[in-house]
Amino acid sequence: MSALVQVAVPSPLYGVFDYLWTQSQAIVPGVRVAVPFGRRTVTGIIVGEIAHTDVPVEKLKPVYRVFDAEPVLPGDLMRLLEWASRYYHHPLGEVLSSALPALLRRGKPAELATQEFFRSLAGCDVQSLPARALLQRQLLRYLVDRAGQPVAAAALRAISTSWRTPVKSLMERGWVERVTSVQLPDNTAKAAAPDLLPEQASAVAAIQKSLGSFQGFLLKGVTGSGKTEVYLRCIQEAQQRGFQSLIMVPEISLTPQLMTRFEQRLSGCLVSLHSALNDSERLQSWLFAANGLADVVIGTRSSVLAPLPRLGLIIVDEEHDGSLKQQDGFRYHARDFALMRARACQCPIVLGTATPSFESLNSVRAGRLTELPLTRRAGDAVPPTLALMDIRRRKLVEGMSDRLIDAMRAHLDEQGQVLVFINRRGFAPTLLCNDCGAAADCRRCDAHMTVHVRHNRLRCHHCGSERPIPPGCESCGSTQLDRVGFGTERITDALTEQFPDTPIARIDRDSTRRKGALEAQLQRAVTGEARILVGTQMLAKGHHFPKLTLVCILDADRGLFGTDFRSLEHMGQLIVQVAGRAGRESRAGTVMIQTRNPDNPMLQTLVHEGYEAFARIAMDERKTAELPPFSFMALVRAEAADARQAHAFLQQVVQSMEQHRVGSMEILGPAPAPMERLGGRFRAQLLLQSDKRSTLNHNLAQLCTHIDHLPGSRKCRWSIDVDPVDLY
């Protein structure tokens, strides 16, 4: 009788599926297999062998093919992913699939790419070749001159694009040998380490002491305090002990800069993992990590899912950043997953930031994390001076006050560099009719279209739809159209008019779409070639601009009135992070924050007492309101072509949860999402809240056993988001 195996397939269905094992290989969990699933053949992952099945054996289908001799997902990582599937209440097949590069999900071999090399062998004789075999003579002489050392195929191709045929002839004579090998990206350190400040040395000693055991650290360092230097020292020690190090950053834009810094200081095999790589590049980097060949892996959130057999140190840079949370599909939080992985691997984890998340600050209070403070900037740099600028009743030039423009001119005259921060891209967020008051709205979302003047387009930044800027109002036909509000494009045009001879760099998602554009713009910023920088939150964290002396924050008030309970926290983090770009070298920095609410107590606290005092007050308010991190939340979201279907389905969810509820849990809703219509579909949500994580997870687990059987489940797309970072 054939053996029985359980396979996790990438499907929205919960659970695993039983198949017949008719293959000659041994059954190994973590191996990829091709299996029939409905009318398709899909790539699944073996979860394990089973002794019996509830499905009649005659109805079971066989495993068609085994792709791997060794598991692509080793046992320790499989166990962690199975935990994540349970914790985030997401189907195991999709969780395991998320951990694999795209090419492995398509069944491609899990093999490292090899390079071709050729070398001459003893006994070869150039002179005995026929005179007419000119290319054979030339190639053989080239190989002989290398004294039998392997020569890359690229070097032979440089001699002639028709090199393969003559080399094949030489191989048939027994004079040339072809060899293949994997080429590691072996790096050599080029720069010496600077001296450490006392606080840095203390942090390094604490982290290095914990290598080989689990310990969580919050490296809370003011901007410019040298957190990266602490990372480097700890990574070097981990390398010397034979460990791999994983460094996670929230944004792709931070990866090249950090990679360059690490290549200057670290020797060994360094690889990066992020979505800007093509599928082949990503697979090779993943395989270097999975085979234990990479000493250092730098990546965005998905890198935490990569196999790392020698993992000995995890670093999460800018741990507060919302980009570390996956917002669709498998909705995991990379920081929280990294904490669990560090515990499972018994290795230290370092969460680094100048503006810790309230979750991490609460973990310090509870003793789950050890705080390592860095209160001084490295070198001669001093913290920037922050000032609120009241713009009520003042004349504004395209959103900028006259005092702000005067300050910019003064800093430029003193050879300083200026950063103008506005967290909106495009020219203007709204196109408004002066006659009837109608706005140009997205036809698929409850949102205004953003004006992009350079391309003469209206674009929705939520669903991506776009159309030409109309010559007249789409409601009344009037040509009296106003572009209301400000974005990076409009601010750049205004500054070009104010400072016509000053080089300006605009850095946002629109201006850096093409490959290499971001690196080129950042290089202009770092060297000081661009004297004025205009950008969004892409510039808010992690970047080091040596010549930057003035930061101008144009719209600080949005976070004061956000609909999400985390809006205030995010506002404080963003202001401090942007402000931290100023004065990172010997010249002092200044930060000017435009506001129409200069007397707001939280703004006043942030500016005059710092982020720590700001966070303490905000966390006390959260605790009083019983909001995270002092309670635990999950969102059940539903979307459908008809708003009534989404609400009806969530009402069924409420009834199901009421029947099976265990413990104290509050159910709020269903209610429309803050943006109800998105991409042509209507969205509703249900908020679940409990003071115990175990209670919330138990009730969600109960829901997952019933939700597929609810009548409305087939009429909606639904999802469960545990620990949501926003309620949008």
Image: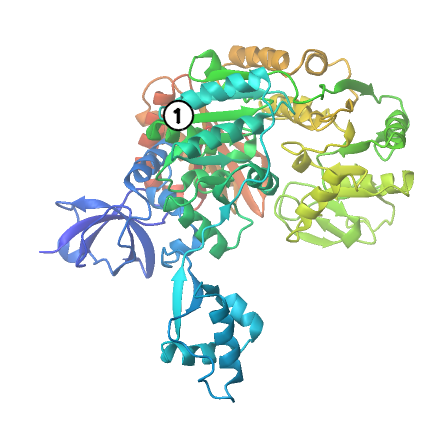
Front residue (pair 617, 636): 617
User: Would residue 674 be found to the left or right of residue 381 on screen?
Assistant: left
Answer with the quarter of the image where residue 682 lies.
top right
Where is residue 249 shown, x and y percent of the image?
Answer: 54, 35
Locate residue 242 relative to residue 635 in the image: left or right: left
The residue tagged with tag 1: helix, strand or loop?
Answer: loop
* Lateral position of residue 575 relative to residue 83, left or right: right
Is residue 198 positioned above or below 121 on the image? above
Crowding at dot 1, Cα within 10 Å, few <14 / some 14-19 / many 20+, comes out as many
Nearer-the-camera pick, 176 or 531:
176
Q: In the picture, residue 500 is in which quadrant?
A: top right
Quadrant location of the N terminus in the rendered image: bottom left
Seen in the picture, residue 507 relative to 230 is either above or below; the reply is below
Q: Which residue is mark 1?
A: 211
- The residue lying at 86 percent from left, 39 percent from top is 495
Total number of numbered discs in the rendering: 1
Seen at 49% across and 14% down, the residue is 626
Who is closer to the viewer here, 429 or 308?
308
Residue depicted at x 57% and y 15%: 198
Question: How does the figure colour the protein chain or chains?
Answer: rainbow
Q: Position of residue 173 (x, y in %)?
A: 37, 80
User: Quadrant where the C terminus lies?
Assistant: top right
Please name the amino acid that badge 1 sits on.
Leu
Res 689 seen here: no
Query: Which residue is pictured at 56% across the width and 14% down the height?
Result: 619
